[in-house]
Image (tube, rainbow, N blue to C red):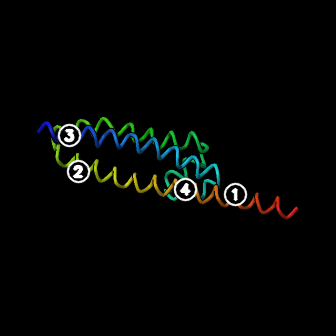
Amino acid sequence: MLAGFWLYVASLSVFLALNALDVHSTWLVVKYSSIRSERNPLARMLLRKLGPLWGLLALKGVILLILPLIVLWWDDAPTQMTLILLAADIAYALVVANNYRIYRRLRRQRSNFTGQSRNSR
């Protein structure tokens, strides 16, 4: 049981870290392109209504509101909650990796564009 608890704590910690990285990576993509780059419709709406920074923080605020429920439900169904968190960790890791990949591509395109415009002068 103790090993299951520590796996849960580790999964929850990774979940929180990945959410912070999701804010950072999404911010970079939106900064280098536009709000239209966001594929999550709820996030895109919040970004439009509140602006990029406040929209992202509001979205993650909702997750922080759900966090106490995740902690409380662990007592009733520890295996299921740990598996749910592990699945969420995998999904967020894929999203964050994709966001950073898009950011690198956008940054490369921008530097190629500015480099070409300088050479053509």
Give the numbered dot on residue 74: 3
Distance from disc 4 to disc 1, alpha carbons, whole Å, reads: 19 Å
Dot 2 or dot 4: first in sequence order is: 4
Q: Which residue is mark 2?
A: 83
Instruction: Give the Cα separation between the discs numbered 2 and 4.
Output: 27 Å
Q: Are marks 1 and 3 in contact (CB under 8 Å)?
A: no
Measuring from the top left, give residue 6's x and y in whole percent. 21, 37
- The amino acid on which the numbered mark 3 sits, given as a three-letter code, is Trp
Q: Residues within 10 Å of mark 2 (few under 14, many from 20)?
A: some
| Foreground: disc 2 or disc 4 | 2
Q: CA distance from mark 1 to mark 3?
A: 46 Å
Residue located at (58% from left, 56% from top): 104
Which residue has dot 1 on it? 110
In the rendered image, the quadrant that contains the C terminus is bottom right
Q: Residue at x 54, y 47 (%)?
A: 46
- The percent coordinates of residue 81 (x first, y second) are 22, 46
Q: According to the image, label 4 marks what residue?
A: 38
Which of the pair 95/45 is nearer the observer? 95
Mark 1 is on which residue type? Arg
Quarter assignment of residue 20: top left
Label 2 secondary element = helix
- Is residue 4 left or right of 41 when viewed as pictured? left
User: Which quadrant of the figure contains the N terminus?
Assistant: top left
36 above or below 25? below
- Per the image, label 1 sits on a secondary structure element best described as helix
Q: In the rendering, which numbered label is found on residue 50?
A: none
